[in-house]
Image (cartoon, rainbow, N blue to C red):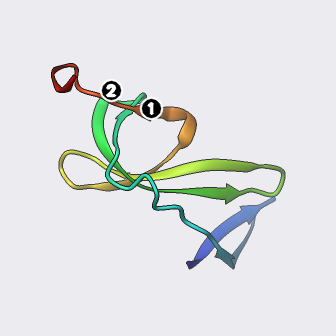
Amino acid sequence: MIFTAERETNGVAWKEQIMVEKDYKLYGTKILNLKTQEIGLLICLWENKFTDKTVDFATCVDKTGKRYNIELDNIRGFEDDFEK
């Protein structure tokens, strides 16, 4: 997948096209958003490559259907106690 990213460095803005490989193997996995403490579903995993490092991200959907991107460190798998 290719998308256009708008970046700014030292007050200079530019657009660049970035190739992002998305992994859908965990599609539909229940997750807990550690920032909001809300349950959601995982859509895909991908890497965000910054100038100095690469950060793992996930695209998720919340209970209202809103899609959002979040650092992988800020979510974890969720299992309902009553499903055991």
Q: Identify the residue at horizontal 56%, vertical 50% (top origin).
A: 57
Q: Nearer the viewer, mark 1 or mark 2?
A: 1
Are there few (<14), some (14-19), or many (20+) residues within 10 Å of tag 1?
A: some
When asked about the image quadrant of residue 67, the answer is bottom left
Are there few (<14), some (14-19), or many (20+) residues within 10 Å of tag 2?
A: few
Say if 19 sits above or below 44 in the image.
below
Residue type, mark 2 in image: Gln
Mark 2 lies on a secondary structure that is: loop
Viewer-proximal residue, 37 or 41?
41
Q: Where does residue 51 sit, x and y in percent of width and height? A: 81, 57
Q: Where does residue 16 sit, x and y in percent of width and height? A: 70, 78
- Which of the marked residues, 1 or 2, is nearer the chain's N terminus? 2
Q: Identify the residue at horizontal 64%, vertical 56% (top origin).
A: 47
Image check: 71 left or right of 40?
A: right
Residue type, mark 1 in image: Arg
Quarter of the N terminus within the rendering? bottom right
Image check: 46 left or right of 32?
A: right
Say if 80 sits above or below 61 in the image.
above
Which residue is the site of mark 2?
A: 37
| Badge number at residue 76 | 1
Mark 1 lies on a secondary structure that is: strand
Q: Where does residue 66 sit, x and y in percent of width and height? A: 27, 55
Q: Identify the residue at horizontal 33%, vertical 26% (top origin).
A: 37
Say if 40 sits above or below 76 in the image.
below
Viewer-proximal residue, 15 or 49?
49
| Badge number at residue 57 | none
